[in-house]
Image: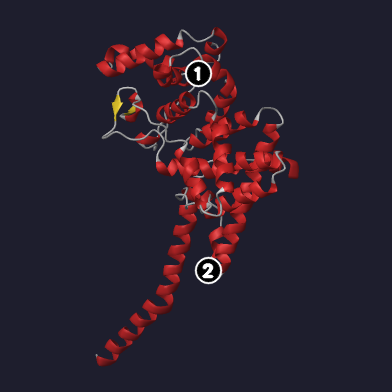
């Protein structure tokens, strides 16, 4: 049973209904604030260790550079698409994608990378049938993607998904799969001479050498900036093909970048430190994790927080408000 439990990725399970959020809040209500902080700190460390362990098994099969690509693309997926993004990263590796882009001029590589990832995901082929109903910019964009797609090797084109439904309700326009894949495409194009993994490792070593003058918490911000690639992509103004958003937005927002750093990049980098037997760097990365900015609450955290808050308010009401009302009522009854 324990072997099966280690293979279960709890975040892949649906937690959208209130009755499946568990009853941790009942335990937390019995603890003092400092004890609650200690429990949450231990839970966070355990979660990080589980991620490192889970990706260490993948590292036995592929390079650390590929592990980083898979972890980051998975973390870019919104709820319901994480597994699909991870499977997509395994379909065509980082090295294979870079080989496809090797002959593309640098100024065109971002657009070609979008054609590559959207084509493999099946988003490009699925939407081209409706070109006649698209606006001029979208039609021109799709035609350019098609032109690039047909230049890629046949074995890559054969990897394209055709039956995947990427539509999902309750996803914000800025978080659609198309925009997230376009964000990864721009990263792929930007790190053409190196890789995202190599750039992150170099940052970590620099941060460790300068730890006497630079606080360790600056490392998480520097890692997040690796994902903020300058681009004029079509998707900075679009949520879907043909669907506009109110104003231009970054393909990977600040909050999502921080989440990717914590959930994907740091586990992969800690795995690198373990692989290199560099205990000092591993401790530095753990300190970066402990000092990183707080992430936005997910649905489970929000539910537990609201339940705890509501229960606390009810307790306050029972202890303070209700007795006061009862005394007020007794006073009024006596006056009558």
Query: What is the C-alpha distance between the residues marked 2 and 1?
Result: 49 Å
Give residue 199's position: percent from left, percent from top.
54, 34
| Residue 11 appearing in the image | no
> Foreground residue, 333 or 316?
316
Give residue 137's position: percent from left, percent from top.
27, 18
Count of number-bearing discs:
2
> Foreground residue, 224 or 16?
224
Q: Residue at x 48, y 35 (%)?
A: 76
Q: Left of 78 or right of it: where is 202?
A: right
Give residue 99's position: percent from left, percent from top.
55, 16
Near mark 2 (Cα within 10 A), the count class, few <14, some 14-19 or many ≥20, is: few
| Residue 172 appearing in the image | yes
In the depicted structure, whether residue 136 falls above or below residue 257: above
Q: Residue at x 54, y 7 (%)?
A: 154
In the depicted structure, whether residue 88 falls above or below residue 267: above
Q: Which residue is mark 2?
A: 33
Q: Residue at x 40, y 9 (%)?
A: 147
Give residue 19's position: percent from left, percent from top.
51, 51
Q: Which residue is mark 1?
A: 120
Near mark 1 (Cα within 10 A), the count class, few <14, some 14-19 or many ≥20, is: many
Please identify the quarter of the rendering in which residue 31 is found: bottom right
| Dot 2 and dot 1 residues touching (CB under 8 Å) | no
Please identify the quarter of the rendering in which residue 204 is found: top right
User: Which structural element holds mark 1?
Assistant: helix
Residue 46 - label: none
User: Which structural element holds mark 2?
Assistant: helix
Single out the residue that lies furthest toward the bottom. Answer: 335
**Quadrant occupied by the N terminus:** top right
> Foreground residue, 201 or 171?
201
**Quadrant occupied by the C terminus:** bottom left
């Amino acid at each position: 049973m324990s072997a099966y439990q280690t293979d279960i990725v709890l975040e892949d399970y649906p937690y959208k209904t209130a009755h499946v959020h568990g009853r941790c809040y009942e335990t937390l209500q019995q603890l003092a604030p400092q004890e609650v902080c200690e429990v949450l700190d231990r839970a966070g460390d355990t979660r990080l260790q589980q991620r490192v362990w889970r990706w260490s098994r993948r590292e036995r099969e592929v390079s650390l550079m590929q592990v980083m690509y898979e972890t980051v693309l998975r973390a870019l997926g919104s709820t319901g698409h994480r597994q699909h993004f991870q499977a997509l990263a395994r379909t065509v590796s980082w090295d294979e994608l870079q080989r496809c882009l090797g002959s593309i001029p640098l100024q065109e590589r971002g657009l070609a990378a979008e054609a590559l990832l959207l084509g493999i995901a099946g988003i490009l082929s699925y939407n081209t049938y409706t070109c006649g109903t698209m606006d001029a910019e979208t039609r021109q964009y799709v035609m350019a993607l098609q032109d690039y797609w047909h230049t890629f090797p046949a074995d890559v084109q054969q990897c394209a998904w055709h039956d995947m439904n990427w539509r999902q309700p309750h996803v914000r326009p800025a978080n659609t799969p198309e925009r997230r894949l376009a964000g990864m495409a721009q990263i792929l194009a930007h790190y053409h001479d190196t890789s995202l993994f190599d750039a992150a490792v170099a940052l970590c070593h620099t941060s460790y050498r300068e730890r006497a003058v630079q606080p360790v918490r600056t490392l998480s911000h520097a890692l997040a900036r690796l994902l903020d690639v300058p681009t004029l992509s079509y998707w900075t103004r679009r949520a879907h093909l043909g669907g506009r958003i109110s104003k231009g937005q970054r393909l990977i927002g600040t909050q999502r970048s921080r989440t990717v750093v914590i959930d994907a990049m740091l586990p992969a980098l800690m795995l690198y430190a373990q692989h290199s037997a560099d205990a000092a760097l591993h401790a530095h990365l753990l300190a970066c994790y402990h000092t990183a900015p707080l992430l936005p609450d997910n649905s489970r955290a929000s539910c537990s927080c609201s339940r705890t808050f509501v229960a606390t308010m009810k307790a306050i009401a029972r202890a303070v408000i209700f007795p006061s009302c009862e005394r007020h009522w007794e006073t009024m009854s006596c006056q009558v």
